[in-house]
Image (cartoon, helix red, strand yellow):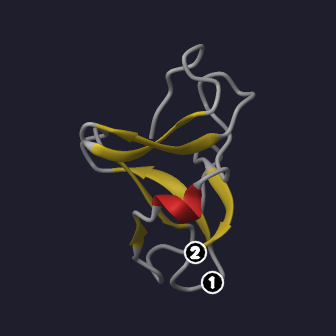
Amino acid sequence: MTSNNEKRSKTNCPYCQTGHLVIRQNSYKKNQFLGCSHYPSCDQICNNIDILENTFLCSGCKSGFMVKRSGRFGKFLGCINYPKCKNTI
């Protein structure tokens, strides 16, 4: 069950195909990850950035979408309005 403050994707869960991917945080609220909205019945997490491109609205500028980017630590999702908006997932 998703709460109002969770970012819900328009992409279905690649594992159960019925739930949607949502951005979740670990118990220490430091790391974000993508999980199924049907947790705990589907407890898989998704790290496939190719599936997630253009599925989340940027929470920073509220006008752009999150797209795949590469950095020195690997791939990540960043706002399409970079450098004006530097929001990342």
x 44%, y 52%: residue: 24
Percent of width and height locating residue 41: 47, 83
Instruction: Tell me the amino acid under the disc marked 1.
Output: Gln
Judge by depth and name the residue closer to the eye, 82 or 5. Answer: 82
Percent of width and height locating residue 73: 24, 41
Q: Quadrant of residue 51?
A: bottom right
Instruction: Tell me the amino acid under the disc marked 2.
Output: Cys
For residue 17, the mark is 1
What secondary structure is found at the residue carrying circle 2? loop
Task: Give the side of residue 45 with respect to residue 38, left or right.
Answer: left
Percent of width and height locating residue 28: 24, 42
Please say if the residues under marks 2 and 1 sit with CB atoms less than 8 Å apart.
Answer: yes
Task: Give the side of residue 86 with respect to residue 71, left or right.
Answer: right
What secondary structure is found at the residue carrying circle 1? loop
Judge by depth and name the residue closer to the eye, 46 or 38. Answer: 46
Q: Name the residue under label 2.
A: 13
Rounded to the nearest angstrom, the CA distance separating label 2 from label 1 is 5 Å
Q: Quadrant of residue 8?
A: bottom right
Task: Give the side of residue 48 with respect to residue 31, left or right.
Answer: right
**Within-10-Å neighbours for mark 2: few <14, some 14–19, many 20+:** many
For residue 1, the mark is none
**Within-10-Å neighbours for mark 1: few <14, some 14–19, many 20+:** few
